[in-house]
Amino acid sequence: MSREAMQMALEALESDPTSLAWLINKKQAITALRQALVDADDTSQKRVDEMVKTEHDRAVELGQAYERGWNAALAQRQWVGLTDDEMEALFLNEDGVRFARYIEAKLREKNT
């Protein structure tokens, strides 16, 4: 409530109820109090809107930061392939090793 509306209400209550000034003060105080209530509702709604926008902006920023971090982590991964010994152990012959190298090359292409 605005200070002005409170002051008008106080003056209306303090004045002589039989005078014309009291009637005028009363009407002005009622009008000022009604406007103060409307203004308070508008201010409250604006605060709620600002809070919602702030929280939305924070969520967007966090999502973007997470995405940047995730992308950076993916970009920093280094390809680690199988050694010839590991391939021979898996495939038990040179043809198997060549096949494994072919698969590894294709995977490297897709992941870079």
Image (cartoon, rainbow, N blue to C red):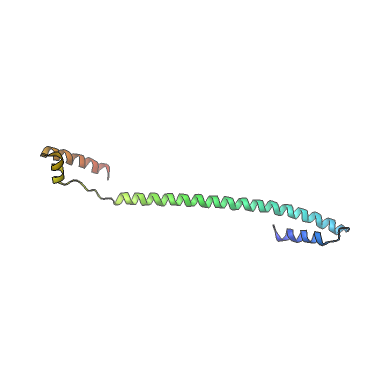
Residue 104 appears at what percent x and percent y? 20, 42
Answer with left or right where residue 71 lies relative to residue 101: right
- The image quadrant where one finds the C terminus is top left
Answer with left or right where residue 107 lies relative to residue 4: left
Residue 15 appears at what percent x and percent y? 83, 61
Q: Looking at the image, is 22 positioned above or below residue 92? A: below
Residue 12 appears at what percent x and percent y? 80, 59
Say which residue appears at 66% left-offset and 51% top-offset: 41
Question: Is residue 96 or residue 74 the one in the foreground?
Answer: 96
Outermost residue, front direction?
89
Outermost residue, right direction?
18
Total marks shown come to 0
Q: Looking at the image, is 53 positioned above or below residue 4? A: above
Residue 21 appears at what percent x and percent y? 85, 59
Say which residue appears at 50% left-offset and 49% top-offset: 56
- The image quadrant where one finds the N terminus is bottom right
